[in-house]
Each structure stands twice: as C-alpha cells, then as structure tokens.
Image (spheres, rainbow, N blue to C red):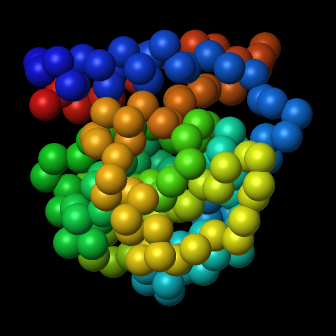
Amino acid sequence: MGAKTMNMILAIAVAVFMLHGTDAAEYTVGDDLGWTIPPGGAATYASWAAEHSLVVNDFLIFNFAVGEQDLALVTKEDFDACNTAEPLVVFKEPGEFQFIKEGTFYLTCTFAGHCAKGQKIALYFAPTASPSPAPSPSQSQSQSQSADDEQYAAAVKFVSKKEYGFKKIIPAAIKSL
C-alpha cells in the first residue's frame, strides 16, 4: 500500500468522529429516491445538486441497498468517462458524509452500468464564510483539477449515526490501491 493511500486512509480515519456543527445542514441525496439508478438518468442527480446550496461541513446522507449499490469518490476525468476501475474511495454501506473542504466532489456507483445510467453526482461545496450558489461542474473544473487525490479524498468524513449518538467507524470498504 503506497504512502499516498495510507495518508488518505489515515486522514479519513482521523477525521471520522465529529458532531454536527450549528451551521451545518443535513441533506439526503436524491431525497425519497435515495442513491440508486435514477429514472430520469443523470439529469435527476444534476437537478438535485443544483437545487441545494451546499457549504463546507454540511452532511449528506446516501441511502442505498447494500449489495445493490455502493458509493465511490472519483476524479473528474473518471466521473466524465464513467470509469470506476480505480476510484479514490469506495463505501459499500449507506451512510452520512461530512464534506470539510471547499470544492467539487465527484461521486458515482461502481456497479456495472450504474454510472452510465445516471447514478453519479457532482457536488460543489462553497466555503462556510461566504456561501454562494452552486456552480455547474464545468465552472468549478479548475478548482477540482488543482487538488491532488489525497486532499480530495481527505475532505470527506464518514459518520455513522447509531441509536445512542455517533459512533466512530473506520470503513473496511476503502479500496486498497
């Protein structure tokens, strides 16, 4: 396992446990639909992203059926090409994620054909000091391409809500590169 991968895993593990901040919002991606192949194709999740003004430290809930979907953080290039062969991080169970850095994040499903059928979303997180409307992924392309893979993946925290509060989890589903 390379040093970059270990640093990425360590950064995610260290950043895991954090309670909701007073200014953080919580959203369920896809609302009632959840995280699945959308009936309206990629436009469904693009519309969802455009309707939400996300800011750093917001929480996103990804609901999906274990074994039928997953959630992968990918580069813009892999997102555009629906290439899921080498995702930065893969989560095999649904969960709640906190995004702790400004920028655009590209998420998809690694199951065969799911990305091509529209199960992918580009999410822009504005800085907390001065939230701004979400730009289209092409407007923020230069921001996302300037970040290296470590910074990109380390900007996401995995938090699992349990009956008695938050539980620290180190996801076993992180892909070893």
* Residue toward you, 165 or 23: 23
Rendered position, 124 above or below 117: above
Rendered position, 142 above or below 167: below
Q: How many marks?
A: 0
| Outermost residue to the right | 22
- In the image, is 104 to the left or to the right of 52? left
Rendered position, 122 above or below 28: below
Res. 107 visible in picture: yes
Percent coordinates x, y for residue 2 in the rendering? 12, 21
Assign the C terminus to one quadrant of the image.
Answer: top left
At 88% across and 34% down in the image, what residue appears? 22
Q: Quadrant of residue 117?
A: bottom left
Percent coordinates x, y for residue 172 in the rendering? 34, 21
Res. 72 visible in picture: no
Percent coordinates x, y for residue 53 in the rendering? 72, 64
- In the image, is 47 to the left or to the right of 79? right
At 78% across and 14% down in the image, what residue appears? 164
At 58% across and 74% down in the image, what residue appears? 135
* Residue toward you, 74 or 146: 146
- In the image, is 135 to the left or to the right of 65? right
* Residue toward you, 118 or 57: 57
Percent coordinates x, y for residue 112 in the rendering? 20, 63
At 60% across and 27% down in the image, what residue appears? 159
Rendered position, 107 above or below 170: below
Assign the N terminus to one quadrant of the image.
Answer: top left
